[in-house]
Image: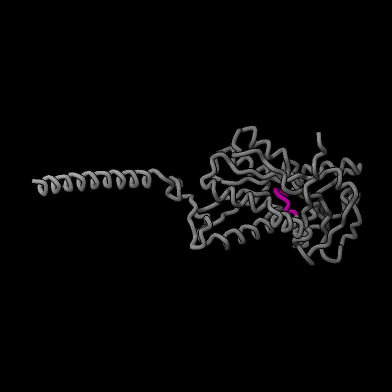
Amino acid sequence: MRTTDASAGDLEDLMHTRALSALVIAAALTLTACGPSGGDSSGASTTTSESGTDQLTGTLTVFAAASLTDVFTELGDQLMAENPDLDIQFNFAGSSALATQVTQGAPADVFASANQPQMTVVTDAGLEGEDPTVFTENVLEIAVPKGNPGKVTGLADFARPELALAVCAPDVPCGAAATKVFQAAGVTAVPDTQEEDVRAALTKVQLGEVDAALVYASDVKSAGSDVEGIEFPEAEQAVNDYPICTLAAAPNPDAARGFLDLVLSDEGRQALEAAGFRAPRREPPS
């Protein structure tokens, strides 16, 4: 009987052990199902590479001022090289047009403006994902075709009716800055064309269609030997701060944060300064 009693006890212990194992497995499966899947319903996600680091994936859409075209494209290429499953789409245009598109519901992850007022359009609508950060600044410079055929020497030449002259439209940041510098210099400008963004004004110079245009210092640098730049003191009366933010409705928030972090990093700052932008001024302590 002792042998029989012992076998029954062993069977009971075995069944109890199997029941506990089943509960443990069920709990593990539940945790796995509820845990992070490496993505979200929008299709934006991060994955883990073989090296164990998170990789950005999906499509990232960046709305940025036209003057940022070259340097943001460079930074975007770098981020995509580091994250092979990430595709960055840029929309470069005048900041006022971009702000309007954002407020009208255009899908975007990041917005970078060439001045504070156009960023305010977005933040007043409550569309920012977080408070904007000023990441660089820029000043105007006179751009003339190679050889300076119009013999332009300074801002006063924008009052010469015999010259073909280009500025930006007053509702975009480079145009608003132009208005300020003309007022500071006491110059009544007589431009022949007002362009929708700074790159359009620069193109007029590169093609020899105008004798001079007011563009940013960074644009003069981007044009290389095709264009000559003329600095003028009144430019410091209209320094443009460039703010950037992620957007609240960003379809790919992880990639948005990754791009913003790169722009704000030392590496991003160096790329901006190499492109002709300036480090942002530090506000005095309150």
Residue at 79% of width from left, 52% of height from top?
278
Q: Quadrant of the C terminus?
A: top right
Residue 210 among magenta residues? no
Which residue is painted at 74% across and 57% down in the image?
270
Question: At which x and y percent is residue 148?
Answer: 86, 63
Relative placement, left or right, of 25 versus 276 is left
Q: Is residue 209 visible?
A: no
Question: Can you tell which quarter of the image residue 249 is in?
Answer: top right
Q: Position of residue 248 (x, y in %)?
A: 56, 39
**x then y, percent, for residue 175:** 77, 45
Give residue 127's quadrant in the image.
Answer: top right
What residue span does the magenta drawing correspond to?
A: 195-201
Please state if 228 lies on the left or on the right of 24 as rendered. right
Residue 277 at what x, y percent from top left?
Answer: 77, 54
Compared with residue 115, is residue 200 higher up or lower down, i.e. above or below? below
Q: Does the rendering let one see residue 202? A: yes
Relative to residue 260, is residue 221 depicted above or below?
Answer: below
Residue at 60% in and 33% down: 126
Depth check: 236 or 264 in front? 264
